[in-house]
Image (cartoon, rainbow, N blue to C red):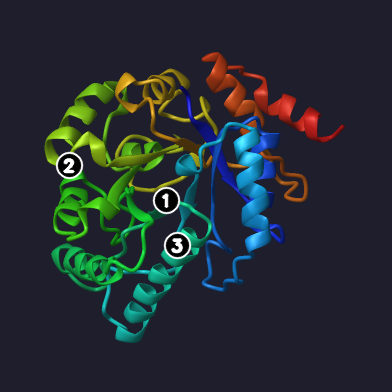
Amino acid sequence: MLIIGSHVSFGKDQILGSLKEALNYNANTFMFYTGAPTNTIRKDIEDKYIDEALSLMQKNNIDINNVVCHAPYIVNLGSKKDLSKYEFSINFIRNELKRCDEMHITKMVLHPGNAVDISKEEGLNNIVEALNTILDGTTKCKILLETMAGKGSECGCTLDEIAYLVKNTHKQDQIGVCLDTCHLFDGGYDLSDFDSFLNEFDTKIGLDKIGCIHINDSKNVLGSHKDRHENIGIGNIGFNNLIKIIYHDKLTNIPKILETPYIGENDDDKERIYPPYRFEIEMIRNQEFDPDFRNKIRAYYKK
C-alpha cells in the first residue's frame, strides 16, 4: 500500500489539527513538528487532542506507526564549541522523544548535526556520544537520522557517515534513517540509478533501517550541496525518477512525506501562498505528472 503524506502544522489543536490538515490533502500519513522548526519553544501536550486524533485515525485507516515527528533544525549534536548548547540539545531531544511517546508517535526525524570549527570526524563522534546519552532506555520513540545535502559543515551527507552514526549507536532498536531525495541528489547521489543506491545502502547500513522517506524534487544540479527543495516534477530529479522511488518494491511499507514548497512561495506576492500537497499526492497516486498543477492549485484555493 502507498503510504503518502506531507509535513503539516501543529497548532492549537496539536496532533488533532495536524491530522485534519493531512486528511484535507487526502493523505494517509503526515509529519509534524511539535512547535516551530526554528526554535525550541514548546507547549505541553494535551491528552484530549491525542484521544480525538487516535479515534479519527482509526476511522480513516491511518496507522499511528506511519506518522512521523521532526525535531527542530536549531538543535546541534555535532558541536561542543559551546558545551551548554550541546547539553541543551541533548536534553531537548530527549524531551521531544518523551513528547512523542505521549502521542504514541514511534518515529522522530533528526538532522544529525554540524561540525562547527572542528573536523568531520570530531563532529560525528560528538553526535554518537549525544545519541548514546539521549537513548538511555527512558523513551521508546525511534530516532531517524536524516540524510543531508552536505551544506557547510553538515554531518550525515554520505552513506558512510550515516553508517558510522548508526553502527556506533548502542540502542540499535531505536536508531534508523530518513532518506531525503533532494538531500541525496544535492549530496551527489544520482537517483536515476536508484537500485544501485539501495544496494549500497543495504551493504553499508541495511534496508531495515529505513524508517521514512522525504519526497522532494531539487532546484539544484546533482552534487550542488545546496539543499533547495522543489515541487514534484519541476526540479532536476524529475517526476518519473521520484515515482520509481515512491513505488519501489523494497520500500512498500515505508511512509513517504512531501516537504515541497508552497505555490507562490518564490513569487513576488508572498501574501498568497498555497499548499501543493493535495495535488502532488493526486499526481503521485495517478503516477502521472500534470504540467498545469500549480495553476490548478491557485485556482482551487482562490475559490
Pointer 2: what residue?
205
Return the residue nearer the eye: 220 or 47: 47
Quadrant containing the C terminus is: top right
Sequence-first disc among 3 and 1: 3
Specify whether 239 is left or right of 10: left
Q: Which residue is disc 3 drawn over?
A: 73
Residue 236, placed above or below residue 173? above
Q: CA distance from mark 2 to mark 3?
A: 24 Å
Q: CB under 8 Å between callouts 3 and 1?
A: no
Q: Residues within 10 Å of mark 2 (few under 14, many from 20)?
A: many
**Label 2 vs label 1, nearer the camera:** 1
Badge 2 vs badge 1, beta-carbon distance below 8 Å: no
- The answer to whether marks 2 and 3 mark residues whose Cβ atoms lie closer than 8 Å is no
Q: What amino acid does circle 3 point to?
A: Tyr
Q: Residue at x 43, y 21 (%)?
A: 243
Residue 99 shown left or right of residue 119 in the figure: right
Residue at the farthest right position:
303
Q: Position of residue 104 (x, y in %)?
A: 49, 53
Q: Residues within 10 Å of mark 1 (few under 14, many from 20)?
A: many
Q: Secondary structure at mark 2?
A: loop
- Which residue is labeled 1 in the image? 106
Cα–Cα gap, marks 2 and 1: 20 Å
